[in-house]
């Protein structure tokens, strides 16, 4: 009911009467009034004027399932939302729910993670209220070999959402770190359960630094947040919605083409490493070269002294010659 009230007030864009709301939602006026009290307690600013009705004047940075549902414009991404105030990691929860049969598009969101992880089991700093910690469950019907490209689809969605909804020049460090002013604002961890020719499910975890003022340990040298870079007070819920809207559109292009050919050019425009010297930290054989962009399958094309090499993500990390990018 709270999410329906929020949606109705947002659609009205001004005052909407208690009578109209009770008719629309099929509940009594008293129920509407009680719902409004609850929303106010949660921090929404709602003006209530006799003979005019209710007006949602301000939505602070509130994150919960009702708020997310009331903002949702996507067709399938986040159709089911599971919200945890605190959890171990949204990827762990997503994998558990996928094993239990959660449908394609189920979205898990947390206010805080106690054991957020990046690639190779590395720690992901996930303090309360400061970031977006979310994971989507996908059940694609393409081949397992194509699934690793989804991480690039997700990176495009985050970069584009930040660019369009916040007007900030987000870039991508291959394959899927989102960079703002040379520092990392978002990490993505894609995991999957497949057998030889079938994908059972894929989970894509996305951590975005929104209002962090500082970072600890290893992250201190490379991380930043949207607030630190722009001073902007960002609504986490609105940004989550923007990410999944973009994701649906890129996912459709990807599924239609069967590879990244329709996304490749835009991705390369966002690539922070493009035409720059990079170090490829391949555990077997590190090397340097100039990054030229991605191929249709997401591999990074690198020009070296000994010819062109194509790098697939897996265990590899990319760094700039003098620093992180
Ligand atoms: P790279 O290839 O650049 O090493 P990665 O994709 O392997 O990146 P991730 O899995 O995205 O790395 O993230 C793990 C790393 O990110 C950790 O080693 C840590 O230093 C750093 N980190 C941890 N928390 C955060 C955070 N909140 N914001 C930015 N960076 C973080």
Image (cartoon, rainbow, N blue to C red):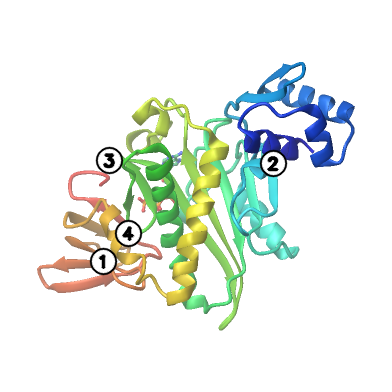
The residue indicated by pointer 2 is 65
Q: Which residue is the extreme one toward the bottom?
A: 197
Q: Is residue 24 left or right of residue 220?
A: right
Residue 75 lies left or right of residue 213; in this view the side is right
Q: Position of residue 277 (x, y in %)?
A: 16, 55
Asked if residue 184 shows in the view, the reply is yes
The N terminus is located in which quarter? top right
Q: CA distance from mark 3 to mark 1?
A: 26 Å
Q: Which residue is mark 1?
A: 285
From the viewer's side, name the closer residue of 152 and 169: 169
Question: Mark 3 sits on what residue?
Answer: 182
Residue depicted at 49% across the width and 70% down the height: 147
Viewer can see residue 288:
no
Q: Quadrant of residue 104?
A: bottom right
Q: Secondary structure at mark 4?
A: helix
Q: CA distance from mark 2 to mark 1?
A: 46 Å
How crowded is the residue under tag 3: few (<14 C-alpha within 10 Å), some, or many (20+)? Answer: some
Disc 4 target residue: 267
Q: Which mark is residue 323?
A: none
């Amino acid at each position: 009911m709270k999410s329906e009230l929020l949606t109705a007030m947002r659609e009205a864009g001004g005052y909407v009467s208690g009578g109209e709301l009770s008719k629309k939602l099929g509940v009594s006026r008293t129920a509407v009034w009680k719902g409004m009290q609850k929303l106010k307690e949660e921090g929404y600013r709602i003006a209530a004027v006799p003979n005019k009705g209710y007006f949602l004047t301000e939505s602070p940075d509130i994150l919960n399932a009702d708020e997310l549902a009331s903002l949702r414009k996507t067709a399938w991404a986040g159709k089911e939302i599971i919200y945890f105030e605190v959890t171990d990691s949204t990827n762990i929860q997503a994998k558990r729910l996928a094993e239990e049969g959660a449908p394609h598009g189920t979205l898990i969101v947390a206010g805080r993670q106690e054991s957020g992880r990046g690639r190779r089991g590395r720690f992901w700093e996930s303090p309360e209220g400061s970031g977006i910690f979310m994971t989507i469950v996908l059940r694609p019907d393409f081949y397992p070999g194509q699934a690793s490209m989804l991480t690039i689809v997700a990176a495009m969605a985050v970069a584009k959402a930040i660019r369009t909804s916040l007007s900030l020049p987000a870039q991508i460090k291959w394959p899927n770190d989102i960079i703002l002013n040379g520092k990392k604002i978002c990490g993505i961890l894609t995991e999957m359960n497949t057998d030889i020719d079938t994908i059972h499910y894929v989970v894509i975890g996305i951590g975005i630094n929104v209002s962090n003022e500082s970072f600890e340990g290893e992250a201190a040298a490379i991380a930043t947040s949207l607030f630190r870079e722009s001073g902007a007070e960002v609504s986490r819920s609105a940004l989550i919605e923007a990410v999944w809207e973009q994701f649906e559109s890129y996912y459709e292009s990807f599924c239609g083409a069967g590879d990244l050919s329709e996304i490749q050019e835009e991705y390369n425009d966002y690539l922070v490493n493009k035409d720059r010297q990079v170090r490829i930290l391949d555990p077997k054989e590190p090397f340097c070269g100039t990054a030229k962009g991605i191929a249709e399958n997401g591999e990074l094309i690198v020009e070296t002294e000994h010819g062109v090499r194509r790098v697939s993500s897996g265990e590899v990390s990319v760094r700039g010659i003098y620093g992180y990018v």
